[in-house]
Amino acid sequence: MEVLTCKADILFNYLLIINSKLQSMGNIKAFLTLATIIFVPLILAPQYFIAIFIVILVCLAFRQRKF
């Protein structure tokens, strides 16, 4: 019985480690996605980036208000 308990504990610890790795990879993927959305337009079309940035700011400003 102790052997099964030990194996279950080891399996549970591995699952916790795998889960924490997947969560950190999710954070990395989210960061890379945001960085791509922000920096690619800045490099490829800087004149349009300012307009896109202003539109985003206006959308965020109006989102804060409850109409």
Image (tube, helix red, strand yellow):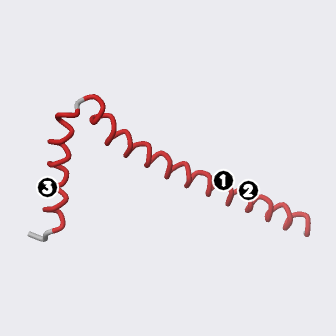
Tag 1 and tag 2, C-beta contact below 8 Å: yes
Q: Quadrant of the N terminus?
A: bottom right
> How many discs mark residues in the rendered view?
3
Residue under circle 1? Answer: 18
In the picture provided, is 38 more to the left or to the right than 32? left
User: Which residue is at the far top?
Assistant: 44
Front-most of residues 24 and 61: 61
Q: Position of residue 12 (x, y in %)?
A: 73, 62
Q: Position of residue 34 (x, y in %)?
A: 37, 46
**Which residue is depicted at the point 40% across and 43% down?**
33
Q: Secondary structure at mark 1?
A: helix
- Is label 2 or label 3 in front? 3
Front-most of residues 35 and 67: 35
Callout 2 amino acid? Tyr
Callout 1 amino acid? Ile
Of mark 3 and mark 1, the one earlier in the sequence is 1
Residue under circle 3? Answer: 58
Callout 3 amino acid? Val
Front-most of residues 24 and 2: 24
In the picture provided, is 7 more to the left or to the right than 56? right
Q: Position of residue 10 (x, y in %)?
A: 80, 60
Q: Which image quadrant is residue 32 in? A: top left
- Is label 3 or label 1 in front? 3
Residue under circle 2? Answer: 14
